[in-house]
Image (cartoon, helix red, strand yellow):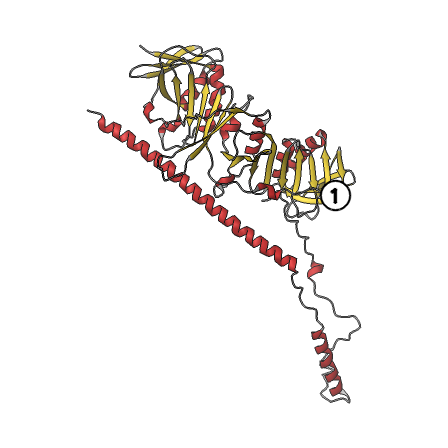
Amino acid sequence: MNTEIILPMPELKNALPGFNKLVSRRTTLPVLSCIKISRKADGEVNLQATDLDAHATFTLATSQPGEAVDVLIPLEQLIKAAKCTGPDQNVALLIGADTTKIRYFIGGSSVQQPVNTIPVAEWPQCPEITADSAPLQPGFASTLKEAMQCCSDDPSRLILNGACLDAREPKAHYVVATNGRFLYSANSFTFPFKEEVIIPDSKFINGSGLLDCEPCLIAVQSMQAKDPANDPIKYVSLQSKQWRLVSRQIDGNYPNWKQVIPAIDSKWTKIKLTDTAIDQLLKVIPNLPGKDDADKPIRLRTGKNALCIEAKDKNDQDWTSVEIKDVTVTGRPKETCINRDFLSPVLKFGLSELAIVDEFTPMLCTEDGKRMVIMPLRPPAPPTTKADSKEPDPEPNQPQPTTSAANPPSTEVQPGADKRKTDMAKDAAKTETTKPAEPVPSLIDQIEQIKEALKNVVRDLNGLADAVRQAEKDKRMAEKEVETARTVLKRLQQVSL
């Protein structure tokens, strides 16, 4: 007798986009391209996907009485069935002793298609989180989504490939993310732990409904690795109404991000943007020239209650300037040059207060506990003109010696000629001695050069450390794949022909 599991179309269409963000189509393990569908003894039906580092589980709203059963269904086959089935119809799994079929509808007619299933024993075990889950404050879901958009995608800096929940200070807990050139932070949260938790950046978090329902529950737990010599493995669990994500944390210590946040004083110029100004900026920025440059530079220039945003192509001599209306400027006129791709998230996140001090200091953007620090671009050098490179003309009153065939140079020694030669030699020597020397770099410039060199060394060391962590991660994944392959080979050896 077949066991039937009903998958309601409204819930299935809510779950499939999230699974599609987590399941890889280029995996070397066929089991990772499947969805595990389970019915427990109490009738609860779960759909689960994994990429070995994270497990995402979707629970159906209604229970279905029946015997407990597990089955693996290829995600592509499930997506095709859902596309053909109407919103008022359901997809069903018919699980038999030897075969499994999927029932769906094409043009209103019922169709049963065999499923090429994989043994459930090959499914990677989801870590069991036994720690208590605690609800998070309203607004955490949207804040984590924003932080995920600010993470780095550089594989050599693995520690920056995720959002950090920083709870090291008892009185101030933060959500932080950075790509090394701009930084996002938000506070007003209380986490149920006292350390830092780094959640890997995942398309699943933004592409599923995990964070669409509040409150969101969080739990953190460490588990001993199979090899006792290795450090414990840390996991974090995020749970909402129907979704639950259990993900492995990124190992390592997050950088000291607070040291790059500048302190605001009276020297800073503050810009307050209204909703109208933000909408105008979002429309202007993509259409300014220079968007094909590597750094995509734009210049912000302030005046008396005025803000101008400017840009130009490499071959342009003048800046293209657009005045932004409905802004309030407090302070002296200032300007700074930044990457336009870093300003767009500021506006989309609703950070309406900007602060500028000079063209070499990071720009600070704030709003209701959220902050973004944007590193400036180096100011463009003024274009050199022909007049700058032209050699000086001779003094106008100096007669130039001329020779011709009619007037050959005289070889006769004139009276006082030796004295004039001696005087000219003395004057030439005096001119050489009074020639100004090349400017020597100041002590502050030398200190800045040394600081920049040390920063490069630290940056290279951090990159090397992140590369080593990535190599260790790849090694663990390879060991998992080898272990799975060995398990399959052992089962094949037990099959009798």
Quadrant position of the N terminus in the picture: top left
Tell me: 238 left or right of 280. left
Dot 1: few (<14), some (14–19), or many (≥20) neighbours within 10 Å?
few
Q: Which residue is mark 1?
A: 266
State which quadrant residue 448 falls in.
Answer: bottom right
Tell me: 109 left or right of 253. left
Q: Residue 197, position in %: x, y?
A: 51, 34
Q: Is residue 288 visible?
A: no
Q: Relative to 296, say whether 283 is above or below.
A: above
Tell me: 308 left or right of 46. right
Which residue shows up at 77% across the image and 70% down it? 395
Q: Residue 415, position in %: x, y?
A: 77, 89
Which residue shows up at 58% across the image and 56% down it? 450
> Which residue appears farthest toward the right when viewing the image?
397
Q: Between 263 and 212, which is closer to the camera in this rendering?
A: 263
| Residue type, label 1 | Ser
Q: Between 74 and 83, which is closer to the camera in this rendering?
A: 74
Q: Relative to 381, say whether 293 is above or below.
A: above
State which quadrant residue 398 falls in.
Answer: bottom right
Tell me: 372 left or right of 84. right
Q: Secondary structure at mark 1?
A: loop
Q: Is residue 335 visible?
A: yes
Q: Residue 135, position in %: x, y?
A: 54, 24
Q: Residue 62, position in %: x, y?
A: 46, 12
